[in-house]
């Protein structure tokens, strides 16, 4: 049965993220999950991504939508590229997911995994990953799959 997965990422990494999503949709590949993450940045009526940080009152709508998606997810993978550590939203998603799942049975930290993108093996991890001592791995689809199904 597929895992309900929330993928946290910086929008600069969307292209590489699409590769991961494509594998999950490929019936010939063992990787399978229900993607519960936000696919596009939230935009205003003109189509411009909203620049509000998570603690801004104007971001309330975004936070509510993301919380719904986090509620439906049982695991989270943080896709780490060169600029992911700068994203306030990625850190907010990690902390919010951790707080939501902290009271559930099982190890909360095992529900979250950071995975550095190909070519980003030295990328700085988001602050929330380090503060919560969440395990990180380099791009490894077999390792990712093993973690996903456990």
Image (spheres, rainbow, N blue to C red):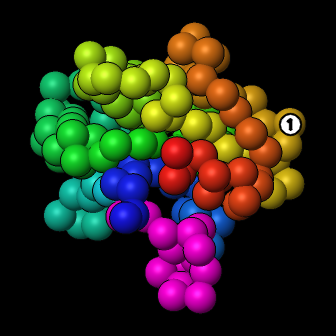
Percent x, y for residue 69? 24, 48
In the image, the segment drawn in magenta is: 20-34
Specify whether 42 is left or right of 13. left
Query: Which image quarter: residue 15?
Result: bottom right
Q: Is residue 80 magenta?
A: no
Percent x, y for residue 129? 58, 23
The one nearer the camera, 13 or 48, is 13
Q: Is residue 81 visible?
A: no
Q: Name the residue located 61 percent from the left edge and 15 percent from the top edge.
A: 133
- Mark 1 secondary-structure assignment: loop
The one nearer the camera, 57 or 84, is 84
Q: Residue furthest top?
A: 131
Specify whether 87 is left or right of 48. right
Specify whether 72 is left or right of 107. left
Q: Name the residue located 59 percent from the left edge and 88 percent from the top edge.
A: 28
Q: Is residue 126 visible?
A: yes
Mark 1 highlights which residue? 122
Q: Name the residue located 15 percent from the left edge and 34 percent from the top edge.
A: 60
């Amino acid at each position: 049965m597929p895992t309900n997965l929330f993928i946290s990422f910086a929008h600069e990494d969307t292209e590489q993220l699409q590769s991961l999503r494509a594998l999950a949709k490929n019936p010939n590949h063992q990787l399978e999950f229900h993607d519960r993450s936000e696919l596009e940045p939230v935009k205003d009526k003109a189509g411009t991504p909203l620049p509000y940080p998570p603690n801004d009152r104007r971001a309330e709508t975004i936070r509510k939508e993301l919380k719904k998606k986090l509620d439906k997810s049982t695991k989270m993978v943080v896709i780490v590229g060169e600029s992911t550590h700068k994203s306030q939203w990625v850190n907010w998603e990690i902390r919010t997911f951790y707080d939501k799942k902290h009271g559930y049975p099982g190890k909360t930290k095992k529900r979250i995994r950071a995975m550095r993108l190909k070519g980003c093996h030295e990328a700085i991890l988001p602050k929330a990953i380090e503060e919560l001592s969440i395990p990180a791995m380099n791009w490894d689809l077999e390792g990712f799959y093993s973690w996903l199904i456990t």
